């Protein structure tokens, strides 16, 4: 979400830009997914913390997947231009979104009473 802006307006490395983007996006995504996408209720503090920890844990796994895709595309395959970095970022976003959805459905926001 913020990756391209950070790339354009800061001298930071792509990995740092991606990390900043990831932290801001996951904080926003937890609340929007919990309350508006999955309408996931929690009936105890334990259930809330389970949702929060598994959500962030899953997002951390996909963060590692995303950074690996970025490193492969930018460093190994040579997509070093601004446009090339953006294209690699779009590809990694597609992969990460798919994995995040299934993680949320199967682990973070599944009905705990089932």
Image (cartoon, rainbow, N blue to C red):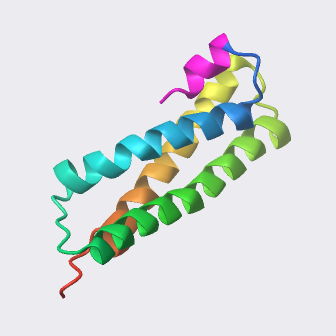
| Residue 91 quadrant | top right
Quick check: 95 above or below 111?
A: above
Of all residues shown, which one is farthest toward the bottom? 114
Residue at figure coordinates x 68%, y 47% from the top left: 67
112 lies above or below 78: below
* SS assignment for the magenta stretch, majority: helix
**Is 51 in the magenta?**
no
Any magenta on residue 3?
yes
Task: Residue 48 in the image: state x and y as whole percent.
Answer: 30, 68
Which residue is nearer to you in this view: 6 or 101? 6
Q: 105 or 39: nearer the eye? A: 39
- The x and y percentages for residue 42 are 20, 69
Stretch of the chain drawn in magenta: 1-9
Q: Where is residue 1 in the image (x, y as percent from the top left)?
A: 47, 30
Which residue is situated farthest in the top direction here?
A: 9
- Res 78 → quadrant: top right
The image shows a total of numbered marks equal to 0
Give left or right: position of 85 versus 59.
right
Tell me the residue at 42%/55% (across/down).
98
Residue shown at 35% from the left, 51% from the top = 30
Q: Where is residue 3 in the image (x, y as percent from the top left)?
A: 58, 28
Is residue 42 toward the left or the right of residue 93 in the image? left
Which quadrant holds the C terminus? bottom left
């Amino acid at each position: 979400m913020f990756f391209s802006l950070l790339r354009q307006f800061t001298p930071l490395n792509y990995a740092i830009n991606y990390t900043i983007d990831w932290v801001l996006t996951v904080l926003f995504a937890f609340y929007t997914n919990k309350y508006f996408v999955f309408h996931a209720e929690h009936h105890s503090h334990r259930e809330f913390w389970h949702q929060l920890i598994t959500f962030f844990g899953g997002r951390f796994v996909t963060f590692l997947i995303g950074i690996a895709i970025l490193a492969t595309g930018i460093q190994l395959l040579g997509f070093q231009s601004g446009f090339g970095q953006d294209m690699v970022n779009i590809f990694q976003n597609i992969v990460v979104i798919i994995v995040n959805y299934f993680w949320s459905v199967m682990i973070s926001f599944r009905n705990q009473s089932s």
